[in-house]
Image (tube, helix red, strand yellow):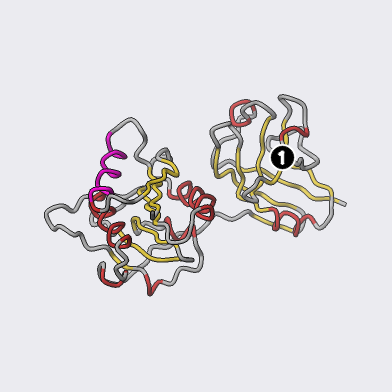
Amino acid sequence: MQIVSLTTDYGSKDYYVAELKASILGKKNDFSIIDISHHIDHFDIVQASFYLQNAVPSFPKRSIHIVAVNCNYKRKSEYICFEHNEHFFIGPNNGVFSLVFDDIDDQKIYKINPADEENTSVNSIFSHGAAFIGHGLPLEDIGPKLENFNKKLVIQPVITSNQIRATIIHVDHFGNVVVNLKKELFEKIRNNRRFDLYYKPNDPLHFLSKDYGDVSIGDPLAFFNSSGYLEIALNLDKANTLLNLNKNEMIQINFFE
C-alpha cells in the first residue's frame, strides 16, 4: 500500500484537511495517508521544510509527499511534482522544496495540469497528482516541464573564527527550541575549545548534555538532538516561555582556549 504524507498549514479547526484527504482517496482509494503536520505556522515554508527534512527519511521508498503550505502565494500559482531519492513530492512552486533539498534537478520538475478544467482547486490538483503517481504513470505526462523553479535562500549561522551566531528555527510541542546549527559545523568551529553558549545576555551554558536527565528538573541544558540540530531546553519544563526564547531570535556561542 503506497503512503501519501500530508504537511499543511490548514490547521484542524476547519474542514480543509478532511476535504484534501477525501479528494485524495476519491481518486485512488487504496492509499495510506499519514499526517506529518497540519499546524505549520501560516504560510511558513521554512518551518514546513524543517518538518519534511526530519520526517521524510523515516518513510519507505516510493512514498508520495504532499506539501500544502502557502499555496496561494501569487495570483496564478503553480503546483509541481518531482522525484527525489526515490520519493515523490507534490506542492506549490513557492520555494519550499528548495529549502528541503539543494540538489533538485530543475529539468525533471513538472507542472501539474488539472485533471478537470472545471475544478482547479488546490486540493483537486494535489489529489490528481497523487493518483497519477500512484498509478505508475510517467511524471513527464502529468504536465509541461517547469520553466522557473522558485528557489529561496536557507538561513545559515553567522560564523567567525571565535564565534557562532545562530537562529532559533523551531519551537516544539514541549517548548524546546531548535537552532539552525548542526553538530558537524559546531565541532568544526569549536576545534576542541571551551565555549559559552548565550541564550540570553547573562548566565551562559558551558557544556553540552547528552539528554534531558543530565540536569536537575527545571534547569536549562543544550544538546544536539536526534536530527543533529542544537536544542535548548529545560528539564521537564518549557524553555520557550520560561527563558523567553522565540522563533527567529539569535543565540550566540563564543569559543576560547
Write down the region rendered in magenta. Answer: 15-26
Q: Amino acid at mark 1?
A: Ala
Q: Quadrant location of residue 77? A: bottom left
Q: Quadrant location of residue 84? A: bottom left
- Dominant SS type (magenta): helix
Residue 15, placed above or below residue 187: above
On the image, the x and y values in percent for residue 177 come to 60, 38
At mark 1, the secondary structure is strand
Instruction: Indicate left or right for 195 with 21 as reference.
Output: right
Residue that badge 1 annotates = 222
Q: Residue at x 77, y 26 (%)?
A: 216
Residue 78, placed above or below residue 44: below
Residue 182, placed above or below residue 15: below
User: In front here: 207 or 162?
Assistant: 207
Q: Residue at x 38, y 55 (%)?
A: 2
On the image, the x and y values in percent for residue 115 come to 18, 59
User: In front here: 118 or 150?
Assistant: 118
Instruction: Indicate left or right for 130 with 40 as reference.
Output: left
On the image, the x and y values in percent for residue 174 come to 58, 31
Q: Residue at x 68, y 30 (%)?
A: 234
Residue 183, placed above or below residue 84: above
Look at the image and say whether residue 18 sits in the magenta stretch: yes
On the image, the x and y values in percent for residue 253 come to 73, 46
Q: Residue at x 45, y 48 (%)?
A: 48
- Bin the neighbour count of mark 1 within 10 Å (Cα to Cα): few under 14, some 14-19, many 20 and up: many
- Judged from this view, the residue extending furthest toward the left is 118
Instruction: Indicate left or right for 111 with 115 as reference.
Output: right
Q: From the image, which quarter does the N terminus lie in?
A: bottom left
Instruction: Indicate left or right for 17 with 154 as reference.
Output: left
- Judged from this view, the residue extending furthest toward the right is 257
